Image (cartoon, helix red, strand yellow):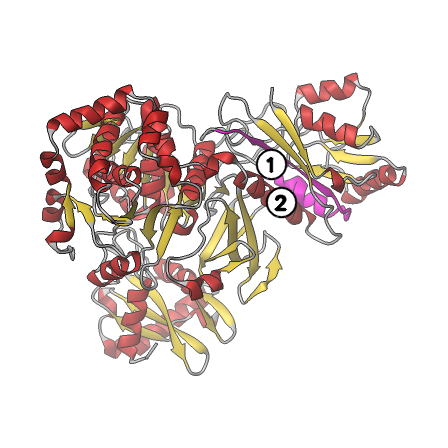
Amino acid sequence: MSELIIRGSENIVNPGFYMPNRISLAAGKALHRLLDGRVCYLVDPTFPPTDEIMEYLKSHDVEVEYFDFRHTTSLAVREQIRTRLDAGTSVVFLPGQVAKWRGTYSDVPSPFLRHVGSLHISPVPLFLGYYGNTVNTLYRDCADVDTHEEFCILPKLAAGPQTGERLMAAWLEKGAELFAAQPLLNTSVTTNLVHALKQFPATEIVDGMTHNSLSHIKALGVSMAVAGILRKRDDKRIGVILPPGAGGVIATLSCMLAGVVPVMINYVSSAAAFASTVRQAGLKTFITSRKFIQKLPQFAWPPEEQLILVEDLLTRTPKSTLIANVLKAKLLPASLLCRMYRTDTRKGEDEAVVLFTSGSSGDPKGVALTHRMLMANISQCACRLDMTGCRFLASLPIFHSFGMTVNMMLSMMTGCMVCSYPNPTDARTLNELIKRYKLTLVCATPTFARAMLRRAEPDTFKSVRYFVMGAEKLPPDLEQEFIEKCGIYPMEGYGLTETSPVIGANMPEPERVKGSKFYVPGTVRPGVGAMLPGIAIRITDVEDDTRELPLTERGMIWFKGANVFGGYIGRPELNKEIFRDGWFKTGDIGQMDLNGFITLGGRLSRFSKIGGEMVPHEGVEQALTEGFALTPEDSGVQIAIAGVSDAQKGEALVLLSAMPQHQRSSEANAILQDIRTMLADRGMPTLWAPKYLVPVEAIPVLPTGKLDLRGCKLLAEEALGIQS
């Protein structure tokens, strides 16, 4: 039976109106005692509590009042509650069963939270969280092992509007606080990986090019041998320039076993971006392979004396040494291996891996993912996903935070098979691998996913349980085409390198709860998913960071949680701008609904302030895409909006166009006038009309398919002779 820990009993108000995010029998009994039994329980039979709770209430002759908020006015419910409070009796709303998917944080349906706001009674929030000490048991329904419940009585909310939003904010902050306090997060990723590889020794890492495989236990043994070589060096950080697969796993794990921080190098970046990465991370040594060097002749490779080649490492290491280390990995206990490599000396807030942002709007920025951050996000993902028999397609590069945390770390930590392939643009081969190995979890950008869909048969994705898309917006037409052609619902997710990276994702629709009229959906469109457990969100005014907005109003998104980073490497001035009281300012514009689903409105860098109003670049691009009747089959990105300084209105919009009909500069004025008319006909504000047209041969994009925002802005400024 789960242990119950009660916190915040000093916040008890008697009589008071209590609103729990969920309730258990143990928590209900404890609250009843704290309120001296002077309690009336409100139950809505359209989402009833569990049978055991209702049986307990009946057997103890506890006062219960039933109501259906859908057919009862707010005034009537208010009077019902006020009558009890005035008589000295506390009122507790008992949330029912509305959710059947993993890792939910609330059993209160969003319509009722909106209803609570119209009662105009200040509630006392109650938060019940379920925690355990293994990677996939941090929240309820995550595993069949012992957990403990933490039942927290929070301070009474101040009177005022939008009570439902403020309840949600209170629950989320307490959940993030309790999650961050879990001992698991202060352990070592390296230690946990060693234990996991020992626990799942036969699990394979399959090379999708050669179809050769490497078992977890052999990967551990080879990594131990390589770590012995790396330990003799004086490097604090080593760059890893390798694609996803066994080589990337061994290089990363070898560094971690040797007490060296692996820095994952973006091998499709420009020479300037790579030089910036090397300088910021202080790198003088890199691990790569000769084969990979041959495949990327265009990359600005470091001097040969700075390279450690995997092939040379393995050929120069005596076979007897490799065999001995594999035998050690097989035969010695995980705890002894960890002591031999002193893995617990690097844990918690110590650097585990360093990644660099894509640099779409400037120089790449270094993000140190600590052991704590990685353990937090791995745990959060494992709570939300059903990892039973999961088989990963790993085509995203390991310099991408999702490729690192989910495809590499999560798969190894949970003993899941991985099929790796280094080219995420080779759609035909990726589809063949999915069918051949019956892969269940596929991650891709919408750009790559569209190419896969074009080459897919109706049964190509038959085995796929989760097809997750991120890094760019999921177009509605692509989502619909996946559903119609392959019968699979693509799940748009959201994350940032700075958050390790996953914040949330849409999920398959859950099983309905018998007897409940309400449920928390798996997907809300056009949202990017419900937040993972253990993360809190704040919304502020875009132009005034000190003005907090209700969670359901659009504004600047801030996050707090154990998976959130502590600042960019070597950027103290920038870090001052993006952190306040432990909250991280993302630069994303958006809002959250009362089921916890986030909807994005774009990056702040993708807005222009024109005449005092914020104009969204993506909104203009979408309107122009529809107006020009551009289809996904058009070759590449055809248009992009950039913002430039303007003496009259502060900023002006520039349309970069690679469309053939826009290439004559002499026709620019007529084209712009047609665009203004087209936007006006669609009900768009006048401010949304581009002031300038710049014909270009191609729109700058990053290898992931995302717009190269910096490149677009530079093109616009150079064409117009504007100094930034």
Q: Position of residue 54 (x, y in %)?
A: 72, 21
Circle 2 sits on which residue?
168
Please tell me whether residue 124 belongs to the stretch shown in magenta: yes
Tell me the magenta residue range: 108-133
- Residue placed furthest toward the right: 87
Which residue is at 27% across, 76% downward? 718
The image quadrant of residue 327 is top left
The quadrant in which the N terminus is found is top right
Q: Position of residue 568 (x, y in %)?
A: 40, 57
Which residue is at 40% across, 50% downward? 496
As helix, strand or loop, the secondary structure at mark 2 comes to helix
As helix, strand or loop, the secondary structure at mark 1 comes to loop
Which residue is at 20% across, 66% downward? 697
| Vertical placement of residue 389 versus 288, above or below | above
Instruction: Name the N-terminal-most of marks 1 and 2.
Output: 1
Q: Which mark is drawn over residue 106?
A: 1
Q: Position of residue 214 (x, y in %)?
A: 21, 27
Q: Are marks 1 and 2 in contact (CB under 8 Å)?
A: yes
